[in-house]
Image (cartoon, helix red, strand yellow):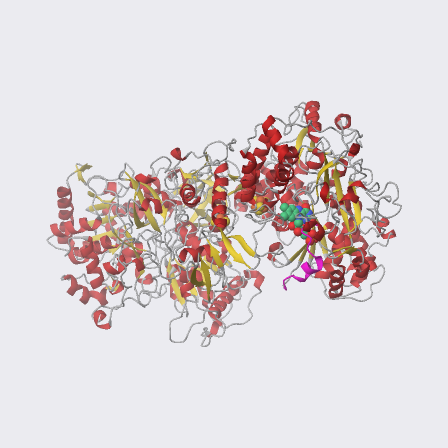
């Protein structure tokens, strides 16, 4: 159960012995959701998912059912599961793939059935070696069990499922870059329009791209009914959400919580969840939805964890990754590291993202090293403005994909929330903070 | 400077057969090449191009886009220290510094004995166990200085050979079947489904050794599983 | 930029000629014996791609900077704005490639339902009611921002950059960019220029990652030998390795379209500064495609050729041979003075002495044996006016019909000239292109680009009948590999009234049935109306000689067979420079200017020229050389012809030249043949003389002059006129314009295409003759775009292209019936019946010898950056045969027959059938012509291991 008493949906089976095996999965009613789906027509499955109103868990929060409804009417149709999870501070899909791969497979199969896909590709971040092994083993077992391949579970319906490893490029999490990558190319996001892979996707064919966590909800929805799912949460945000909590909290980790019922404060301070800030220090700021999202401060702690509520305060729920920063955190250093990430991961197509990311990184580095100038704050904001005009969220773009506009939030949040701290760096010609320390924990080796 | 061995070439062809277009198998084939040689050789990339119908320049263009592919030799163990935000907040740069001192190389470098290559990595998605490290993409969480030294010592001593294969080996579980459904897809069924039907099974992929990888023996840390501590008692706590 | 095009520019070639869908047409006429029926499974021949949707011509209204304009629906915003007179800055966009919207320079503010957004104008098509601002604050901030960001990592080493002064990055920064850079950090560093091929250098620091070069290599040239490497701001353009250079025939184009100085051409590096350049618009004479070019000079030296975007022809592209052949013009080995043989030595003399000697020798020959005793070989290097002058001189003054612009290596003029012609656009938009083995990639490179594009983008189906695979084979629906020498049999089977029951000429029956199915499908798609010419041809046949190791019998049989089918139009595959101009001007036996038969035109031309014309058809090159060998030619003129190198049968050529009593060579180089002449007259080349050129479509374009010829070299027409004068005749003109005026007066083919028409802005892309239908080929050109054609616009300030200034005159008017009345009819049917099949006998292997782009030809040899590209001759066999012989590639093989023997390194070519050995034509170190005899039979050879 989650803290609100709602059932756990995607982390339900975690913690048991070897939950990744077929035997363990079947013990828990594994593949009954698929069986249920196969007893329905694909239209009925889609309708159920519409009722459940499953928001995409990959970052954009698009309703899964609505996405499926946009599929172009042509064949073949492909389903691609996005397991590229690389948004810094997000580590939920990693866990789901490693610990409950059959759930991911079953979810993908239900999705494929609903959208009448001809083939499923599980695109898994290349660094997830264990995840790839567990997932491949699960797929092998699923084939052997008869849940994948020809005549699935005797239903007459057939679909193949292929585990596809990535190779280390954050941008391949962006769905059109993912498709390019899956086509064996450089992971360049495709220019829009066409806006949705549902119209033009893999090899130009209509394609559904869904996140691992998104489809992991499907077996539960099939078994317990769409209404049970929709009874959880509030407004658009139904069901549960896995929150990946990291940073300066006492108990970082993944917490599955009922959507729209729990606040950031609960997440970070509840003893059963984050347990408060380490050494009971002050919370300085937190990143609410992955490093792409604009930051929030202590004054925003009572915002509910619901996509629309978080959007109301000018940022996003994103992938559900919350990172807490305590009072010892150097804002310049944090912003620099985030921008450095985008600089390293920019695919390089768009001039503003390619060149802007490096420039912003360099300016921040200069400030952190004590070589900043006061004009740098305006310069930073202006370069950011050239990447994402207005520096607002949801962002305006001068780029093809949203990686570009993800560059400004960290530095802009830093400047807006802590202008004095930046000026101190500049005026004192040095960083006023001590370096971060290693935690006093023992490595698991 | 090696092309794929005949056995691996067959594996590459099996990979190609899984996709509607050969080029899609390029990245899996490049992983296969790295498994064989530890890194991507020129000959290997050319061979990959021949198999999927690309010029070598295109193979290189694709390979170079991805961080996991190395076109120069790397150590037997590629140690990646995450320094992204969650790990940074837990002292990742200090850990990286320590790693550099311990191995006597700057990140990006390889020890003279060819055993270790050190990388400053982007978020590895183990942020609940920050700071974290991977060795050949096998995960180790909550790593401190002593933990790091211990890890290095055990790697050097070969104590972790079972858990950490040499660089390049990614997935030791092979796909056991070819495509089974091609052309057999029947849409729009619905109706009762028997509990466990004996359906037509695709044939196993030819000459694949059945891999005896025991997926349970890894010492690696799966991403932190929360809510497994003290059982949640009642509802929400008041802050 | 000065072109006041009133209507939006159309950018896609062929749209003007493309009718709507073929569905619903009536009156389809398919030859009975080829009527549709299930013949063959698709998979055997490759399934045709879906038809390309054609825009129905709908218009929409958009507002650009407050001005309402009406533009074609679906047009890209950047194009629509440009047509409306608003230029949107850009880098990655090139009008001849697919938009990718990467550089973000073209962002403009577009008003939408949810407020204004920035959209890349290069990627988004116009939509009705769209409101665009290219000057708003939002747009300007974006432009300013992108430019500043582009300069973040740009070295700004403009003073030492080839592009400095004509650099789009410089120009656009000035026009749209920030005044100063706020970037103070260290820039990205890379090794300064690295060669990526023999011809192209790459400076990665200057690269702005627009991807034009990488896209060109893949999308246009089909040679993806360069690609991006790494990602983000570490992205660089790269070849795979030094052993895998960017060895594309089209590599120079990436230099041309690079919007910064990242890619530079080795032959041009540091040769000139843009502001010192003079330029003239001209036509490339390297092959018969006739690409439009800007020829640029610095200090009376040719330094660069740039492709001009000619919509019906080259779309701005050039092949590397055409682009860099100017090095040969500059060559120190050019002939600059007349030479006369004295005491067995060729010595420099004055023009007067040389002309006297030449005239004297020719006169003696005529006196001794009449016109039949003299002959003129060559002329494909000449401009149209030169060719006309020489043809008139030969027939009216020397009294001979022994004239031939071809060297036994083409297709007989009377076969070719009567065929209904297709334009390149028509070939590209036809449903089916059938080739008789010509390899356009090697021989007509830019035609290859157009056909490749048509096959990939427009659904053109290509069927090849060929002895070996060609550059086009990758894009062909069917490549029927026939045994050398058996084209005739294959064609017969393809056009027979029943499907074959067995293999024919080594081609499987199923393949032949597949080809027949393609013919049927073509007729269905572009129906042939009974009794009327097709709106567009159903089938275009590219006709040329596949292999020079056999005669032209196969091609003649193919022409006879296919010209009997409906809806067929022809594209000539003759490759040599202005060979079509020379043929149209009558430099062929039995053919008078304007594609008129000798007998049909005799009366007309005698009245026009005031001279008696020779009776009876004269000899072609092979017969002339044979006659010369027997001592029957007293005077032989070589017009830029080098029979020893180019005539397929080397022995025959050598004997002929030796046997000719008096030889005059008019040439720009002292070729092997010219060395044997009694008089050598130095001729000016392109860029040194004006004139007109006729390409393989029959398109007449200008040749511009911009440098002075070396020494005292003359234009060919002057040489003809002076010789005539010395023989007591006045050819009747005093300048080039006079010749053209006479041509348009006497030649039915050129009626109406007078100087004024040719100079009109509407004729910027030339005029296809005969200019029926008021000059159907004429379309408004795309205005010059400094981003699409960098290098042309900025130099234009200094030297204006001849057509840029031209007054706009009405297009060609069709000559009225009366005007035409006395003119003789043009040839309409191919001459001569199909020859009987040539028996094959002799040695075990049949020889195939095809041309390749880089060869040991005169021009390549004298262009010092090109000559190293020619690959040494080799003997290619199927690898199994090499194994049978026990040799590895590179080992020496002996290829011999009763004519000669060649020792060549072995090469493996798995696409060759057994029993065929391929030796490239005119490759350095292996004159295949020494194995060929001129009798026309397919050459057979013995292949042995050299001991
Ligand atoms: C730069 C970038 C990175 C992304 N990375 C991921 C990712 O790692 N995993 C993911 O599921 N979605 C990622 N997304 C979102 C995907 O584009 C896409 O919206 C998502 O996979 C759709 O699945 P969903 O609707 O189930 O959420 C990313 C988007 C962007 C712009
Ligand atoms: S915004 Fe950045 S990551 Fe996205 S397509 Fe453009 S350059 Fe690539
Ligand atoms: S993005 Fe439009 S020209 Fe580059």
Q: Left or right: C393 with respect to B160?
A: left
Residue at position x 27%, y 41% in the image: C669
Outermost residue on the left side: it is: C728
Res A42 seen here: yes
Rendering coords of residue A190 (x, y %)? 58, 51
Quadrant assignment, res C5:
bottom left
Total numbered badges shown on the rendered structure: 0
In depth, the one of B178 and A201 nearer the eye is A201
Rendering coords of residue B207 (x, y %)? 73, 46
Ligand 2: quadrant of the figure: top right
Q: Left or right: A428 with respect to C753?
A: right
Q: Left or right: A383 with respect to C341?
A: right
In depth, the one of C791 and C460 nearer the eye is C791
Quadrant assignment, res C901:
top left
Which residues, given as a range, are shown in magenta? A57-73
- Queried whether the magenta region covers residue A72, the answer comes back as yes
Res C506 seen here: no
Q: Quadrant of the C terminus of chain A?
A: top right
Using the image, determine if residue C699 lies above or below residue A93: below
Rendering coords of residue A379 (x, y %)? 54, 37
In depth, the one of A52 and C527 nearer the eye is A52
Q: Left or right: B44 with respect to B191?
A: left
- Queried whether the magenta region covers residue B133, the answer comes back as no
Magenta residues, dominant SS class:
loop
Rendering coords of residue A420 (x, y %)? 63, 33
Quadrant assignment, res C863:
top left
């Amino acid at each position: 159960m989650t803290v609100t008493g709602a059932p756990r949906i995607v982390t339900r089976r975690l913690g048991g012995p070897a939950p990744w095996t077929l035997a363990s999965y079947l013990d828990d009613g594994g593949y009954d959701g698929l069986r249920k789906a196969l007893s329905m027509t694909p239209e009925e499955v889609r309708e159920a998912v519409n009722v459940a109103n499953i928001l995409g868990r990959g970052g954009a929060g698009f309703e899964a059912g609505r996405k499926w409804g946009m599929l172009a009417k042509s064949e073949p149709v492909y389903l691609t599961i996005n397991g590229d999870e690389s948004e810094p501070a997000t580590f939920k899909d990693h866990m789901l793939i490693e610990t409950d791969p059959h759930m991911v497979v079953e979810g993908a199969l239900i999705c494929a059935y609903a959208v009448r896909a001809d083939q499923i590709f599980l695109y898994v971040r290349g660094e997830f070696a264990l995840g790839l092994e567990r997932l491949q083993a699960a797929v092998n077992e699923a084939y052997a069990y008869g849940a994948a391949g020809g005549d699935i579970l005797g239903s007459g319906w057939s679909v193949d499922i292929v585990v596809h490893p990535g190779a280390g490029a954050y941008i391949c999490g962006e769905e059109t870059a993912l498709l390019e990558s899956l086509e064996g190319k450089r992971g360049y996001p495709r220019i829009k329009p066409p806006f949705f892979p549902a119209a033009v996707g893999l090899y130009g064919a209509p394609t559904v791209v869904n996140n691992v966590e998104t489809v992991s909800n499907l077996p539960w929805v099939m078994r317990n009914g769409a209404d049970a799912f929709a009874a959880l949460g509030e407004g658009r945000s139904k069901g549960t959400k896995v929150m990946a909590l990291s940073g300066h909290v006492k108990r970082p980790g993944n917490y599955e919580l009922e959507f729209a019922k729990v606040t950031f404060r609960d997440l970070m301070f509840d003893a059963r969840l984050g347990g408060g800030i380490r050494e009971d220090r002050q919370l300085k700021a937190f990143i609410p939805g992955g490093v792409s999202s604009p930051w929030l401060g202590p004054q925003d702690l009572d915002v509910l964890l619901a996509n629309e509520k978080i959007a109301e305060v000018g940022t996003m729920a994103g992938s559900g990754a919350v990172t807490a920063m305590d009072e010892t955190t150097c804002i310049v250093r944090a912003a620099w590291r985030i921008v450095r990430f985008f600089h390293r991961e920019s695919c390089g197509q768009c001039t503003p993202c390619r060149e802007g990311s490096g420039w912003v990184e360099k300016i921040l580095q200069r400030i952190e090293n004590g070589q900043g100038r006061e004009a740098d704050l305006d310069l930073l904001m202006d370069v950011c403005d050239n990447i994402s005009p207005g520096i607002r969220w949801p962002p305006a773009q001068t780029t093809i994909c949203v990686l570009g506009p993800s560059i400004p939030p960290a530095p802009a949040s830093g400047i807006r929330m802590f202008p004095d701290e930046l000026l101190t760096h500049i005026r004192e010609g040095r960083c006023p903070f001590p370096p971060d320390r290693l935690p006093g924990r023992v490595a698991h080796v | 400077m090696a092309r794929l061995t005949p056995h691996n070439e067959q594996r590459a062809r099996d990979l190609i057969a899984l996709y509607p277009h050969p080029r899609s198998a390029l990245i899996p084939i490049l992983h296969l090449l790295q498994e064989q040689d530890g890194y991507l050789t020129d000959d290997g990339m050319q061979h990959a191009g021949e198999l999927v119908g690309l010029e070598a320049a295109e193979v290189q263009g694709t390979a170079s886009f991805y961080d996991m592919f190395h076109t120069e030799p790397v150590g037997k163990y590629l140690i990646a220290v995450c320094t992204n935000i969650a790990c940074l907040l837990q002292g990742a740069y200090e850990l990286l510094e320590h790693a550099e001192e311990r191995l006597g190389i700057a990140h990006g470098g390889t020890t003279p004995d060819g055993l270790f290559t050190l990388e400053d990595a982007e978020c590895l998605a183990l942020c609940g166990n920050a700071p974290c490290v991977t060795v050949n993409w096998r995960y180790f969480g909550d790593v401190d200085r002593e933990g790091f030294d211990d890890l290095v010592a055990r790697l050097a001593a070969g104590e972790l050979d079972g858990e950490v294969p040499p660089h390049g080996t990614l997935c030791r579980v092979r796909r056991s079947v070819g495509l089974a459904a091609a052309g057999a897809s029947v849409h729009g069924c619905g109706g009762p489904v028997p509990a466990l039907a004996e359906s037509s099974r695709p044939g196993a992929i030819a000459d694949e050794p059945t891999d005896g990888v025991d997926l349970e023996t890894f010492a690696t840390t799966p991403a932190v599983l929360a809510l497994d501590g003290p059982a949640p008692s009642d509802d929400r706590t008041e802050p | 930029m000065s072109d006041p095009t009133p209507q939006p520019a159309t950018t896609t070639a062929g749209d003007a000629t493309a009718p709507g869908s073929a569905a619903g047409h009536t009156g389809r006429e398919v030859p009975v014996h080829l009527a549709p029926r299930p013949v063959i499974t698709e998979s055997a021949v490759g399934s045709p791609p879906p038809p390309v949707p054609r825009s129905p011509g709908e218009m929409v209204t958009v507002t650009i900077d407050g001005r309402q304009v009406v533009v074609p629906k679906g047009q890209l915003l950047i194009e629509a704005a440009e047509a409306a007179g608003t230029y949107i800055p850009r880098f990655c966009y090139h009008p001849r490639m697919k938009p990718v919207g990467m550089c973000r320079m073209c962002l403009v503010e577009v008003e939408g339902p949810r407020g204004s957004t920035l959209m890349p104008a290069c990627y988004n098509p116009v939509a009705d009611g769209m409101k665009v601002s290219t000057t708003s604050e939002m747009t300007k901030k974006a432009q300013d921002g992108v430019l500043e960001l582009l300069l973040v990592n740009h070295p700004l080493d403009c003073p030492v950059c080839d592009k400095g002064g004509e650099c789009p990055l410089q120009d656009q920064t000035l026009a749209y960019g920030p005044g100063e850079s706020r970037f103070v950090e260290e820039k990205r560093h890379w090794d300064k220029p690295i060669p990526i091929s023999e011809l192209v250098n790459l400076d990665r620091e200057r690269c702005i990652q627009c991807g034009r070069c990488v896209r060109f290599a893949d999308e246009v040239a089909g040679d993806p030998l360069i690609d991006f490497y790494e990602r983000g701001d570490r992205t660089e353009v790269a070849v795979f390795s030094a052993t895998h250079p960017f060895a594309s025939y089209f590599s120079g184009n990436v230099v041309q379209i690079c919007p910064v100085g990242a890619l530079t051409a080795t032959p041009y590096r540091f040769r000139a500064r843009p502001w010192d350049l003079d330029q003239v618009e001209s036509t490339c004479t390297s092959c018969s495609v006739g690409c439009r070019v800007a020829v640029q000079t610095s200090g009376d030296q040719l330094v660069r050729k740039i492709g001009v975007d000619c919509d019906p022809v080259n779309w701005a592209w050039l092949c590397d041979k055409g682009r860099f052949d100017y090095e040969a013009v500059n060559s120190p080995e050019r002939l600059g003075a007349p030479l006369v043989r004295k005491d067995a030595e060729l010595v420099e003399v004055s023009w007067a002495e040389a002309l006297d000697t030449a005239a004297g020798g020719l006169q003696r020959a005529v006196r001794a044996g009449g016109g039949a005793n003299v002959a003129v070989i060559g002329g494909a290097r000449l401009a149209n006016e030169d060719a006309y002058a020489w043809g008139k001189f030969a027939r009216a003054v020397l009294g001979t019909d022994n004239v031939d612009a071809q060297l036994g290596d083409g297709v007989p003029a009377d076969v070719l000239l009567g065929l209904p012609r297709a334009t390149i656009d028509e070939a590209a938009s036809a449903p089916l292109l059938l080739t008789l083995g010509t390899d356009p990639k090697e021989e007509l490179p830019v035609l290859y680009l157009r056909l490749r594009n048509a096959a990939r983008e427009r659904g053109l189906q290509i069927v090849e009948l060929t002895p070996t695979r060609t550059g086009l084979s990758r894009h062909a629906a069917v490549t029927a590999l026939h045994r050398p020498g058996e084209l005739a049999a294959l064609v017969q089977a393809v056009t027979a009234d029943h499907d074959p029951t067995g293999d024919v000429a080594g081609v499987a029956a199923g393949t032949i049935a597949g080809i027949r199915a393609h013919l049927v499908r073509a007729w269905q798609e572009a129906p042939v109306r009974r009794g009327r010419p097709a709106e567009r041809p159903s089938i275009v046949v590219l006709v040329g000689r596949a292999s020079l190791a056999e005669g032209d019998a196969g091609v003649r049989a193919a022409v006879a067979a296919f010209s009997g089918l409906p809806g067929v139009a022809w594209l000539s595959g003759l490759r040599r420079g202005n060979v079509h101009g020379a043929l149209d001007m009558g430099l062929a036996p039995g053919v008078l200017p304007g594609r008129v038969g000798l007998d049909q035109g005799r009366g007309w031309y005698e009245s026009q020229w005031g001279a008696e014309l020779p009776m009876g058809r004269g000899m072609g090159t092979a017969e002339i050389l044979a006659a010369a060998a027997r001592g029957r030619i007293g005077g032989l003129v070589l017009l830029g012809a080098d029979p020893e190198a180019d005539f397929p049968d080397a022995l025959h050529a050598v004997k002929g030249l030796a046997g000719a009593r008096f030889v005059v060579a008019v040439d720009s180089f002292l070729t092997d043949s010219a060395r044997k002449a009694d008089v050598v007259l130095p001729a000016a080349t392109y860029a040194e003389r004006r004139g007109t050129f006729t390409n393989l479509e029959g398109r007449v374009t200008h040749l511009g002059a911009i440098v002075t010829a070396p020494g005292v070299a003359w234009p060919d027409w002057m040489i003809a006129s002076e010789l005539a004068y010395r023989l007591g005749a006045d050819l009747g003109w005093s300048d080039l314009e006079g010749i053209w005026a006479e041509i348009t007066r006497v030649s039915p083919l050129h009626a109406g295409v007078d100087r004024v028409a040719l100079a009109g802005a509407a004729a910027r892309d030339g005029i296809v003759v005969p200019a029926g239908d008021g000059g159907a080929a004429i379309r408004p050109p795309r205005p010059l775009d400094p981003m699409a054609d960098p290098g042309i616009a900025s130099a234009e300030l200094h030297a204006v292209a001849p057509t840029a200034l031209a007054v706009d005159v009405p297009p060609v008017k069709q000559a009225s019936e009366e005007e035409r009345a006395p003119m003789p009819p043009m040839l309409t049917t191919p001459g001569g019946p199909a020859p009987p099949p040539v028996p094959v006998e002799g040695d075990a292997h049949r020889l195939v010898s095809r041309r390749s782009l880089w060869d040991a030809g005169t021009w390549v040899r004298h262009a010092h950056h090109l000559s190293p590209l020619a690959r040494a001759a080799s003997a290619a066999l199927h690898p199994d045969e090499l194994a049978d012989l026990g040799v590895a590639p590179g080992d020496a093989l002996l290829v011999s027959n009763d004519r000669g023997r060649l020792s060549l390194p072995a090469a493996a070519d798995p696409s060759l059938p057994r029993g065929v050995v391929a030796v490239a034509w005119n490759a350095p170190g292996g004159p295949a012509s020494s194995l060929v005899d001129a009798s026309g039979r397919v050459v057979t050879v013995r292949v042995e291991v050299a001991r």
